[in-house]
Image: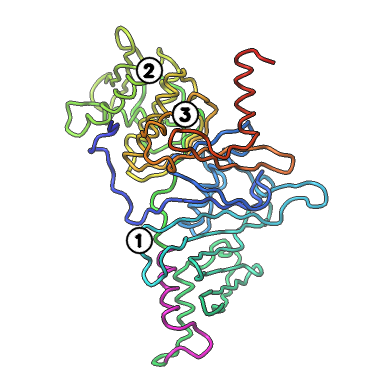
Amino acid sequence: MVWCARAFRGHRSWYADPVEKLIMENFRCFAGRHEIPLKPLTVLVGENSSGKSSFLAAVRLAWDVVRRRGEAEFNEEPFWLGAYEQLATYRGGRVGRSKSFSIGMQTHPARRLGRLPVSAELRFEAAFSEQNAQPVLVKRSVSYGAYALLTEVQSIDHTVSTASTPSGTWPIPAGDVDGPRVARLPDWLELLYSFGGRRLPGQAALPGLLPPPDEWAALSDLAEAARSVGGFRPYAIAPVRTRPKRTYDPVKDTPDPEGQHIPMVLARTLDASIPGRGPLRDSLMRFGEASGLFTGINVRQLGKEGDPFQILIKTTGPARNLMDVGYGISQVLPILVELFTASAGRTFLIQQPEVHLHPRAQAALATLFGQLVKERRLRLLVETHSDHFIDRVRIDVRDNLTGEPDGTQILYFDTRKDGSVIHPIDLDEVGNVLGAPAGYRQFFTDELHRSLGID
C-alpha cells in the first residue's frame, strides 16, 4: 500500500548518503569507543536512562560534524545535553571525567568518488575537549580507505594538519588562527588548497613535499566528497508532542520537534477540493482506519482565510473537536504529517511514537513505518517502550512488508556499572531475533511475567 501519494514526494539530495554507522567515544553514558551500525528501520529498546535519547542526539550530531564543520549543536530541541560535564563520560575514582569525547559517522557512497578506489567506507570523526566548561572542537578527520585528512588543535592559536595516502603521511602547512576561530577548523577543500600551495609557479611539485600526482588528485576527490555528503539534517520528533487546542490561530508553520506547526500544515493541505491537497488526507485516512483511531479529519474555518480555525476528528458519530477525542490522536498526528510530507530518503529520529495509543494503533504505526521505509526510502530510528510495536515489526519482516530482512534491526541498550552497552540485534527472514543477549530476553520475559502476575 502506498501511504503517501506522489504529489508529496520531495526531491532527494543528489548526494544524500545515509549514516550507516554511528561512532561514539566517551560520550555521555557510553564509556570507551562504540561503532554501531544503523539500518533503514532501527528500533531502540531498553530501560529508562540507558542512553537511547543520547544515541539519537548523537546521530544528529554526527551530521553536524560533517555538514557544519564540526560546529555541533549540543543543546537544541528536543535534545538538551548540557555542558561539557554532562557530555563527557564520567568513570569515577582516579579516572574521573574523560578529557575528550568523539562523535562521528561512516557511510558508503552511492557512487564512485572520482579517482578514489572502489568499495571503501567514508568516515568522519570530530573530537571535543573542555574550554570554559563548554565543548570545543579540537580534532577533525575524514578518511576513505588509505586516504585521510586530519586537522588538530595543538594550542589556542595553532593547528596542525596532515594528509595520508598509500605512499605515506604528508604535513600540510600549519596555520595560525585566533581564539574565536579555533572551533572552526579549516574545511576539507581549504586544507587541499593549502596543500597545493606548495607548488611553485610554473614548476612541478617540490620533491618530497607532495604525494604523487595521482594520490594528490585522489585527496582532492576525498575533500570534495566530504563537502558533498549529508543531504537533509536528521529531523527529531520529541517524545511528548504539543497539547491540542480547541481553536488555532494562523501562525508560521516553522518545523518544531513538538509539532506545534502541524495544525497550520493541516489547514493548508487538507482541503481536497484544491488541486494537490488531497494526498495528505488520503494517507491520513488510510492510517486512521488501519489503526482504529479515526475515520475522518477536517479543518473548520471560523471565518475567512487567515482567521482562527479548528481541527475536527471523526471517530463514531458526528465529527468532534480535536480537544474532545482521545489524547493519542493529537500525539500521533505530528508524526504522521511529518512522515507523509517528507522528502524521500530523509532520516527521522522518533521518540516514543506510541505515547497514549492503544495496542492496535501501536502495531499499525509499526506497519506504517516499515512501509514508508520500503516505499519512500525513509530512514527511521525509533525509540519505543512498546512490545506491541516490536512484535508487529517482527511480523512485518516475516510477511515481507518492510523490504529485505537485513534492512531492519533492534538496538538493545544494556545498562551496566561502567556505562551502557548497545547490542545490535538482527532479524531473520521469519522475524526471529538473531544473537540477542541474555539481558534482552530477560527484559521482555520479566515484563511478560509481570503482565501475567507471575513471580
Which residue is at a point 66% across and 14% down the rendered structure image? 454
Amino acid marked by disc 2: Leu
Amino acid marked by disc 3: Pro
Distance from the alpha carbon under mark 2 to that under mark 3: 14 Å
Label 1 near label 2: C-beta < 8 Å? no
Nearer the observer, 26 or 297: 26
Residue 21 in the image: above or below residue 416: below
Residue 338 can be seen, yes or no = no
Which residue is at a point 64% across and 12% down the rendered structure image? 453
Nearer the observer, 278 or 6: 6
SS assignment at label 3: loop
- Residue that carries the numbered disc 2 in the rendered image: 293
Residue 110 in the image: above or below residue 173: above
Residue bounds of the magenta highlight:
204-226
Residue 428 location, x and y as percent?
47, 38
- Residue that carries the numbered disc 3 in the rendered image: 353
Upstream in the sequence, badge 2 or badge 1?
Answer: 1
Query: Is residue 196 magenta-colored?
Result: no
Residue 177 can be seen, yes or no = yes
Quadrant where the N terminus is found in the figure: top left
Of tags 2 and 1, which is closer to the observer?
1
Query: Is residue 212 magenta-colored?
Result: yes
Amino acid marked by disc 1: Arg
* Magenta portion: prevailing SS class: helix
Residue 111's label in the rendered image is 1
Q: Residues within 10 Å of mark 3 (few under 14, many from 20)?
A: many
Q: Does 40 sit left or right of 152 as displayed?
A: left
